[in-house]
Image (tube, rainbow, N blue to C red):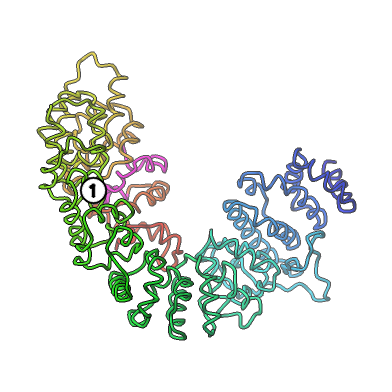
Amino acid sequence: MRIVILLHKLRCAKTDPEYGQALGQCMDHSRVSQAAWEAVVANLTKMCPWTLHTILGGSKDYLLRAEADVVEELPTVSCPFQLGVMMHFFRGLYPEMGEEMREKLFKWAKRSLRSSRCQAGKSPSNGGLRPPPSSNDGQSPPRPSNDGQSPQRPDMNEGSDGGSACGLSWVNKDTVALLGIFIMQASNRDFAQVRAEQVCDLIEESDFLARLTEAADDLPDRVKHVMDMLQTQCGDKAQLRNISRSGPLACYMSNMDSMDAANMEKRLTKLRGCKNKDAMKNIAGLVRELAKKKPVDREMLRSMGASASALTSRQIANISDGVILDTIVELGEGREWSRGQSRDLVRKYLRGGGKVKSGSDLVQMGSLVRGLRSGTLRNVSGPELLRAARGGLEDEAQDMSPFQRGTIVGTILAGVNTTDAIESLSGSLLLVVPLSALVAADVGSLTNITRKQWNVAQALYLCTIVFNNGSMTHVEFSELGALTQGVTCKELSNYADQFGTQLGLALGNATWLSRNQLTCAGQKMRDIVMNLPAGTTAEEIRNLAESLPSCLLLYIGEEAIARLYGNDCPGFLSKMSDVKMECLPRSSPVRGQLLERAVGCLGDAMSTLDGAGVRSMGALVCEFTGTNVTQLTDAAFNASIPLLAKCRQFEASARSVLATRLVQTLGPASQWSVDTVRSLGSLLTLR
């Protein structure tokens, strides 16, 4: 009864626009739309195409609001007409769907296609998969073809992917037209079964290129694959030629037609927003070709923007000095200039009458300051260099050579009060300030001393001043920042005695601590833990455990860990999840001890671990031995792959075993998709 009422309302809506609009608002605020979807799920295999089409239209609002999991409720269908109606509807919603729902719908369609092909193999009269014509206006369901031809039986020689009980592939001559833009969700292995001519036919679909454009951000590799196929296999399709003139798909055009200079400049403007690798190559090629066709003038350089860095040294040499002088600001905004190009451009700028005398002169040159000779930098006064440092030169200096940075800092210190100079500098320029300058400066008057970047030698000296009075709270110690590098083991020991159980809080996240400092801190923390008073409560111990920097667990020893965590497996594993095991020597016995403790927490045996247990081990999976890997269940090994991919090193005995299990799990490496290869990280180094 619910279906009949809904059908009546929807049919009325088709003939009465005002009623239709009111019905749409009603469905937005009621369960009618959800009821329509539930009706489709419950009766899909029994519905005729017209009824299915009508009820699907009513489910749109619910489907776009629902979680992607609702798609999994759909039963597999083998009737070509039902499948055609469903995909016709889903293709219309593609732009509004989330990526997860698109993926789930593709998998459902793939199952249904395979089922349909298998059914067609048994019943010759039901073999054709005729997708809805692209000219359908969306107001009526796709109807069976009436061309007098009997539906074609699927070609039994099209090959199989091994996933079908009847041995047929899910792909036939009509598959791509039926799926439309959903073919973008196919894996590389699935897509390899698609024939070029099928993709070429999609160009004639009125909205396919628009949908392909929308997919460019989410699926750049697949869009590139499709675009390569379209360009190499589809001849002179008019719509394909239009792609190269505008739109995001132009970023994926690899075949560039011969163009005159005017069209090249237009193309550069279109491609300027592209970020993909192929577009960068095309832009570089266009820039070099354009420079061959006409002299590079001011307007051309400005139109090239950052892509001007693709110019060759000879082409740069052919640009007049005056043009470089007039465009130095725009050229300096580019970040891709090589050091050699920067030198060439600066030389032409100076020959053209450019001046480098003040801080503003340096700042306007942007990234090109890397091309300045040290002698030129010395000609700028110390106060002007300091003004430039405050105005942006500090940021550019990180890409300069150590000699250039040293020249800048030396000139500043020679012409400016040392304390004022150190107060103003930060980052890469501050790091080259010599110790003699720190000794000469009034360090005690410096503000934000704990927020600046210091090298180890600077930090060692400054700590002798900061720690001079021998008194500091654990909060003050935790805010030392880069100065922590200069804390000696003796100072660390003295302060640890003051901080007691607050030592963990004092060390903060231990970002700046060296391995030697961590060893000293670990020894002090072990003493603190093992000497806790007998009356220490469980809550106090838990607070102490939570306060420890994760990396300190590598240095406090097994007994202290047992005292801190006892049977608190989640607490221990949570802390270990952030530990960088490479901080320990490869031969350290602590590695095996921590792994053994984690496995004991989770179930006493590697063979009993499930996927969730393995995921909770974090970086400890990097300590798996060959025997450990062999003992893992398939589910546990699958769960470990993303974690193993992040490991910087593996146990020697595990390398060959891991390589073997990867092939057993994922199949031959020659069949891995691009996404799979990218996800494997350091596992790709295994043999």
Locate residue 543: give its quadrant: top left
Q: Farthest top residue? A: 535
Is residue 124 a member of the stretch shown in magenta?
no
* Element type where label 1 sits in the image: helix
Locate residue 120: give its quadrant: bottom right
Name the dominant secondary structure of the magenta segment.
helix
Locate residue 378: give its quadrant: bottom left
The boundaries of the magenta stretch are: 603-630
Graded by Cα atoms within 10 Å as few (under 14), some (14 to 19) or many (20 or more), the crowding at tag 1 reads few
In the picture shown, does residue 616 fall above or below 134? above
Direction from residue 10 to residue 647 in the image, left or right: left
Q: Position of residue 93 (x, y in %)?
A: 68, 55
Q: Position of residue 450 (x, y in %)?
A: 24, 38
Residue at position x 78%, y 43% in the image? 25
Nearest to the observer: residue 25 or residue 343: 343
Residue at position x 60%, y 61% in the image? 214
Q: Position of residue 273 (x, y in %)?
A: 51, 65
Query: In the rendered view of the protein, which quadrant contains the N terminus?
Result: top right
Residue 2 can be seen, yes or no: yes
